Image: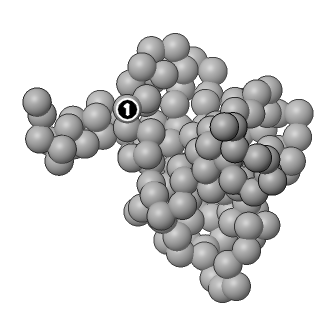
């Protein structure tokens, strides 16, 4: 079995590290593959590595763009106060730089990334063809028995 740091380095080395400038400074992305763009937004206290088990298989048919959202991973922190709307504005600006309009894209968000992803999808409108929520919080749903 591959040692965790070596595994992380290997997966990262198969893609590209891309830095986009947003209002708070640098927003860092990892990118793999070719094809229709798929933007991945991680959960709270995370980074692009929340998607490490998925990026290579997704990249066989997609251009996978895994963000380090502002304030997480390698991206610069936003100014206070920290709000979901302010973070969504920054992430939407980063997406615009990675996938310039009017190109369509698909979006997936895990946990906190699903909440921010919903706000980003609202900002990008019809450009978002699909939005997948994985383990979203804040929906007020009762857990299954």
Position in image of residue 25 (x %, y %): 55, 71
**Where, by quadrant of the figure, is residue 2 drawn?**
top left
Q: Quadrant of the C terminus?
A: top right
Q: What residue do we see at 66% from left, 85% from top?
A: 80
Return the x and y of residue 59 as percentages of the image width and height. 46, 22
Look at the image and name its color scheme.
Answer: one colour
Which residue lies at the image location 86% right of the left edge and 47% below the top edge? 122
Quick one: which residue is furthest to the bottom in this view?
A: 80
Q: Quadrant of residue 88?
A: bottom right
Helix, strand or loop status at disc 1: loop
Residue closest to the eye, 119 or 65: 119
Residue tagged by mark 1?
53
Query: Is residue 15 placed above or below 77 in the rendered structure?
Result: above
Judge by depth and name the residue closer to the eye, 47 or 100: 47
Residue placed farthest to the top in the image? 61
Counting the numbered discs, the total is: 1
Residue 74 seen by the camera: yes
Q: Quadrant of the N terminus?
A: top left
In the image, residue 76 above or below residue 106: below
Q: Residue at x 41, y 63 (%)?
A: 74
Counting from the top left corner in percent of width and height, residue 143 is at: 69, 44
Q: Is residue 12 left or right of residue 83?
A: left
Image vertical order of residue 134 relative to residue 44, above or below: above
| Viewer-proximal residue among 128 and 96 | 128
Residue 92, horizontal then vertical, whole percent: 72, 53
């Amino acid at each position: 079995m591959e040692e965790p740091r070596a595994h992380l380095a290997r997966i990262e080395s198969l893609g590209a590290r891309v830095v986009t400038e947003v209002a708070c400074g640098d927003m860092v992305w990892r990118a793999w593959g070719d094809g229709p763009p798929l933007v991945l937004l991680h959960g709270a206290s995370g980074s692009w590595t929340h998607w490490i088990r998925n990026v290579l298989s997704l990249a066989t048919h997609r251009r996978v763009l895994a963000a380090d959202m502002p304030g997480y991973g390698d991206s610069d922190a936003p100014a206070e106060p920290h709000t979901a709307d302010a973070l969504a504005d920054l992430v939407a600006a980063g997406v615009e730089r990675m996938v310039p309009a009017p190109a369509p894209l698909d979006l997936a968000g895990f946990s906190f990334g699903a909440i921010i992803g919903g706000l980003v999808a609202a900002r990008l409108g019809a450009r978002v063809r699909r939005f997948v929520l994985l383990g979203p919080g804040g929906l007020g749903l009762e857990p299954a028995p």
